[in-house]
Amino acid sequence: MECKGKNPSIRCTVSQCAHNMGSEHYCTLNTIDVGSHEANPTMPQCTDCNSFVKKS
Ligand code: SF4
């Protein structure tokens, strides 16, 4: 589900994502799905935002 503006609870600098409010570095979704591509994640780099959609 999409908010009208930024979600102040989700900061994000991935400006290539269609859900990103690039000017303010926030996500515009109400909720996001976060996961990992690792079996045993040990650092931030092991995690992924699975709600990412490439900006067209
Ligand atoms: S969906 Fe994920 S990657 Fe995209 S703006 Fe929101 S938090 Fe960032």
Image (cartoon, rainbow, N blue to C red):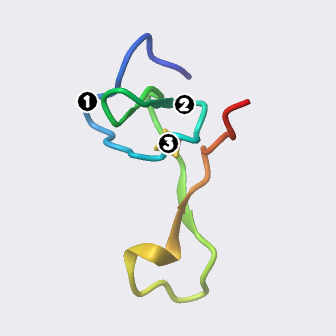
The alpha-carbon separation of the residues under discs 3 and 2 comes to: 10 Å
Name the residue at 50% across, 42% down: 32
- The extreme left residue here reads 8
The alpha-carbon separation of the residues under discs 1 and 2 comes to: 13 Å
Across and down, in percent, residue 12 comes to 38, 44
Residue at the spot of label 3: 32
Name the residue at 42% across, 31% down: 22
The alpha-carbon separation of the residues under discs 1 and 3 comes to: 13 Å
- Disc 1 residue type? Pro
Asked if 2 appears above or below 22 in the picture, the reply is above
Q: Are marks 1 and 3 in contact (CB under 8 Å)?
A: no
Residue at the spot of label 1: 8
Nearer the viewer's eye, disc 3 or disc 2? Answer: 2
Could you say whether the residue bearing mark 2 is in a helix, strand or loop?
loop
Crowding at mark 2 (Cα within 10 Å: few <14, some 14-19, many 20+): many
Nearer the viewer's eye, disc 1 or disc 3? Answer: 1
- Disc 3 residue type? Ile
Across and down, in percent, residue 47 comes to 50, 69
Name the residue at 60% across, 31% down: 18
Across and down, in percent, residue 10 comes to 33, 40
Name the N-terminal-most of marks 1 and 2.
Answer: 1
Name the residue at 54% across, 30% down: 19
Quarter placement of the N terminus: top right
- Disc 2 residue type? His
Residue at the spot of label 2: 19
Asked if 2 appears above or below 52 in the picture, the reply is above
Among the 4 quarters of the image, the one containing residue 48: bottom right
Left or right of 53: which side holds 2?
left
Left or right of 55: which side holds 21?
left
Q: Disc 3 beta carbon < 8 A from ligand 1? A: yes
Q: Disc 2 beta carbon < 8 A from ligand 1? A: yes
